[in-house]
Image (cartoon, grey):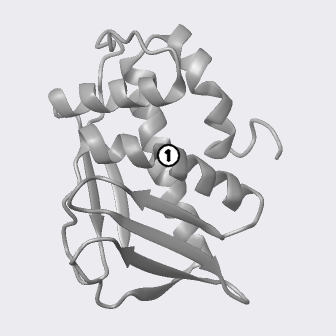
Amino acid sequence: MELNLNVQKGISSAENVGSTADCFVGLVADVCEYADDNRIAVFTVSGFGEKHWPVDVWYDLSTIMEDMIKAASCIRNDSYDFSIYFLGQGIQRRLVFSENEGESVDVTCLSETSWEPNPNKISMEKEAVRQMVNNFLSNFFFLARAVVSSRIYAKFFSEYDYLTEPNIRPC
């Protein structure tokens, strides 16, 4: 199973999103829409029998960001029990992460459509899950830093920096 966000490097900070959002969710949606419109990010998910999940940057990426932040927070607190919900019409899947004894995590894919995951459960090493979530959020915050003003970034995103930068502040 893979969950990736690849962002074009060398994005100029002059490429600021003209957002009027007044909350985290709204600004995430604006960042994702801007990234999609300007083709500066690629969001991919694969696994459970499907090589390329039908996800996009504009909608699907924006809808999982809160779950990704919760996942990173759980991992920072040494818990691997969380879920990521893809609520977009046509995909409607939930990835449920459940910690096992030792160093592994079960990942179960639940579908709310006629699509059936095969297999519906896999096992991943904790370190692989941690790296996947950390890389994903690091790339999103890189994107957000590049396309919103420093004032807006500080207001809406800087409180989450500790999730991907371990020396900023302790949990």
Q: Residue 61: x percent and y percent? A: 34, 45
Nearest the viewer among 27 and 11 is: 27
**How many residues crowd around disc 1 within 10 Å: few (fewer than 14), some, or many (20 or more)?**
many
**Residue occupying the far right of the picture:** 170
Q: Is residue 147 above or below residue 79?
A: above
Q: Is residue 13 above or below residue 30?
A: above
Residue at the spot 19% in from the left edge and 74% down from the top edge? 51
Label 1 sits on a secondary structure element that is helix
Judge left or right: residue 93 versus residue 115.
right
Q: In the figure, residue 14 lies in which quadrant? A: top left
In the picture of the structure, the residue carrying the numbered disc 1 is 137
Q: Residue 124: x percent and y percent? A: 51, 82
Residue at the spot 60% in from the left edge and 57% down from the top edge? 71
Q: Residue 26: x percent and y percent? A: 43, 25
Residue at the spot 66% in from the left edge and 70% down from the top edge? 80
Quadrant containing the N terminus is bottom left
Nearest the viewer among 34 and 7 is: 34
Q: In the figure, residue 8 lies in which quadrant? A: top left
Q: Is residue 109 above or below residue 26?
A: below
Q: How many marks?
A: 1
Q: In the figure, residue 34 lies in which quadrant? A: top left
Residue at the spot 52% in from the left edge and 51% down from the top edge? 68
Nearest the viewer among 73 and 8 is: 73
| Residue type indicated by callout 1 | Leu
Q: Residue 126: x percent and y percent? A: 61, 75
Judge left or right: residue 25 versus residue 127.
left
Judge left or right: residue 84 versus residue 115.
right
